[in-house]
Amino acid sequence: MFALAVLGTFVVIRQVSNSLEQRFENQLLDAGTNVNQTVLKVEQEQTELIRLMANSEGVSDAITRHDSAALQQLLVPLQVNSRFNVADVLDSGGQEVLALRPSDGPLARAFDPNAGTWDVSQAVLSGRIDEYGNKFSQLVQTSFGTVLYTAGPVVTPQGDIAGAILVGLPAGDLLARLTKDNLAKVSIYDAAGQSLETNMPVSDANQLRLADRNYLDSVRQGSVISRTVVATGGDYLELVGGLVVRDQIVAGMGVALPTDYIHQSSARTRLFLELLFSVVAVLVVGIGVFLAKRITSPIRVLVEACRNVARGDFEQDVHVGVEDETGILAATFNDMVSGLRERDFIRDTFGRYMSKQVADRVLSGDLKLGGERRDVTLLMSDIRSFTTLSETMEPEQLVEFLNRYFGTMVDCVVEHDGVVDKYMGDAILAVFGAPIEDPDHAKKAALAALEMRQHLLAFNAELVANGHQPIRIGIGINTGPVVAGNIGSEVRMEYTVIGDTVNATQRIEDLTKEFKTDILVSDTSLACMGDGFVVDEPRFVTLRGRTHSTGIYPLVGCRGEVDSPAKSPSGKRVTEPVSFPDLSAFS
């Protein structure tokens, strides 16, 4: 019943609205037809006035002699008896001989020196004749505004063209005549969609600009643009078609009528139907409330449970106490929550043994047995004299110490999107650029190393405060190709990287002892890190297993600010640049 009431109301209102809109559009089309007929009538009146002027005795001779006084005496009486207060007389070369204007007002001094170059003037002076004759009409953009001009030739008794007479009607006067017998508002648009003249009640003519710059081509093909215009005092529905002059579309013409009476009629119909609909709705709602209460109670329980799951709370089950579809939904929901708890447990467990990126790809099934060749940056760090240090600690103390150390250093790697590939005793091998590709892998590795340097200072301060000796570390950074992938068998797999780049990284890290510094980067890494880092003088060494020398650079710090893509949860930088530190504590 409710659906039928809604459907019936919608259909009836739609039918009534469509009927009113159709009647309204028909009125607009009739108004547009009347406007174009008025334009045709104006053309005919202009042509008739030109015929009277051109055939007056002595006009051709006065034009030939450039006798403006004689022309004024001959033509002014004819102009006064017409509706046109703008007329121009040109000689055969297009030079203005006489310009007839009103004695006062804005057109009193209106004059365009280019009148002889207008298309309508040239068509007459060149003796052109087409199927409509030797008189031409055009909407001309003059120096004193838009004017509808009609031009005709003045012929000498010998049959030569002595000149041309142009009779014009300014666009404002044209609109006044177009709307005299119509309630519609008229606007004239140029080819760019800009309003040339309008009597629409708008504060700025730019409000009428047409969005479609190619509208005139559409209009010439028979299309009509319909749109709503917001004007002072109310809205208007405007139809934009073509302004036809001499059987050609020379501009866009918009005819608009206010839409108030459509809205009022639609509002009355809508009010009546809404009252009828309300009565039916009350009956339907009365029946529905009773049924809804029996359904919504368990639904509310499920909604609250869904909100808890969205917040990450998987520790509750739903009990609705019904055996219908809602009960089935509740049981399915409980199975889903159980699966989410198991998934989080597995992910957390994986995350304790491998990096989050690798764990996510393992759980999603993206990592298969095998590998791929990829350019990455490797970072290897090692604690100096760890064997001696371990001999002074009990096993429990040693494990606690390493866990604290690794926790501090690994945070630096993870914050810069690195992946800890493996722990080798006291050493850490981290990969940047795998398994997730990252074009900034070398920069991030360098920033991670600088942050490890900073964290080591704080870590050593804690050691000294607790009565222990500070430690020193060495870090090697190298960029190159590796084979990265899931290595192993279907029973036991490990995501790792292998290749000469790994071996070279370990040997670069070993050189920190010889060079008495804490961070060394290879020439391949330096080439990918960018210009934001400061390095010391290079050493060129031949690494074990290689036949060519490799440039090794001590990494001093950052050159001012280096943007790191790694961000803390608050959105702030996690690495403060280090500039020219004292490396004596690391050598």
Image (cartoon, rainbow, N blue to C red):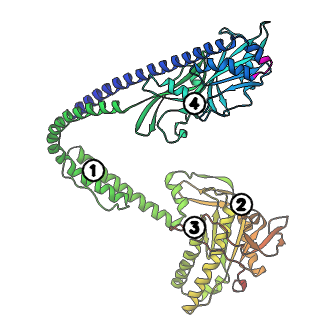
* Earlier sequence position, callout 4 versus callout 3: 4
Q: Earlier in the sequence, mark 2 or mark 4?
A: 4
Q: CA distance from mark 4 to mark 3?
A: 64 Å
Q: Is residue 150 visible?
A: no
The numbered mark at residue 534 is none
Amino acid type for the residue under numbered disc 1: Ala
Residue 525 image-quadrant placement: bottom right
Residue at label 4?
Answer: 189
Task: Check disc 2 and give the amino acid type.
Answer: Gly
Q: Amino acid at mark 4?
A: Tyr
Q: Earlier in the sequence, mark 2 or mark 3?
A: 3
Give the percent coordinates (x, y) of residue 291: 16, 43
* Residue denoted by label 1: 331
Q: Closer to the N terminus: mark 2 or mark 1? A: 1
- Label located before the other in sequence (4 or 1): 4
- Of discs 4 and 3, which sits in the foreground? 4
Q: Quadrant location of the N terminus?
A: top left
Q: CA distance from mark 2 to mark 4?
A: 73 Å
The relative height of residue 218 versus residue 539 in the rendered view (above or below) is above
Q: Which residue is mark 2?
A: 499
Above or below, 101 against 503 in this view is above
Residue at which label 3 appears = 414
Q: Are the residues at dot 4 and dot 1 in contact (C-beta closer than 8 Å)?
A: no
Q: Secondary structure at mark 4?
A: strand
Q: Secondary structure at mark 1?
A: helix
Among numbered discs 3 and 1, the one appearing first in the sequence = 1
Given residues 428 and 559, the one toward you in this image is 559
What's the magenta region? 63-67
Mark 4 nearby-residue class (10 Å; few <14, some 14–19, many ≥20): many
Q: Name the residue at 29% across, 27% down.
A: 11
In this rendering, which labeled residue sits more in front, label 2 or label 1?
Answer: 1
